Amino acid sequence: MNPLSPHNYQAKRLQFGASICLIALILLCIAWESVLAPLKPNGSLLILKALPLLIPLFGILKGRRYTYQWAGMLILFYFTEGVVRAWSDTGLSSQLALMEVVLSLIFFLCAIFYAKLTRNNALKGAA
């Protein structure tokens, strides 16, 4: 693929979008459960929910297609948690949950379109 091709440009944009959303989601989870609206006044162990998001981080930053494929499935847990907490929580926690939904949805869309766009390169490399 030509470095200046439209496919490469689009893939870079999707990679950038996914990377930004993943990093923002990690920071949101940490801030939410430690300072902004923790379940308990001094924070809770829900802060550990950010740890699984660190696993795909370097693969996403490096543009590894396989990481995008499985991270797209991992992010659905965060989407589900965000929907449930946006529905059941009140105040700031509900707003943070909506942010989690938006970030996870954007990440999911970037990940599936990145995997689809880079599919031809993966097939060429296998042949």
Image: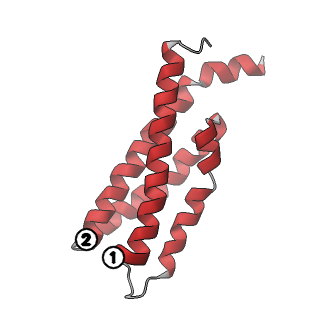
Residue that label 2 marks = 92
Q: Could you tell me the amino acid type at mark 2?
A: Leu
Estimate the x, y position of residue 102 in percent, counting from the top left. 33, 50
Residue found at x 61% / y 35%: 63
The label on residue 37 is: 1
Q: In the picture provided, is 97 more to the left or to the right than 108? A: left
- Per the image, label 2 sits on a secondary structure element best described as helix
Type of the residue with mark 1: Ala
Q: Residue furthest bottom?
A: 41
| Percent coordinates x, y for residue 120 in the rendering | 62, 18
Q: Position of residue 11 (x, y in %)?
A: 52, 26
Q: Does 38 sit left or right of 127 as displayed?
A: left
Mark 1 Cα within 10 Å, few/some/many (few <14, many 20+)?
A: some
Identify the element where label 1 is drawn.
loop
Q: Determine whether label 1 and label 2 are within 8 Å by CB.
A: yes
Relative horizontal placement of residue 58, taking residue 53 as reference (left or right): right
Label 2 environment density (alpha carbons within 10 Å; few <14, some 14–19, many ≥20): few
Identify the residue shown where x is 59% and y is 42%.
60
Residue 31, x across and y down, in percent: 41, 69
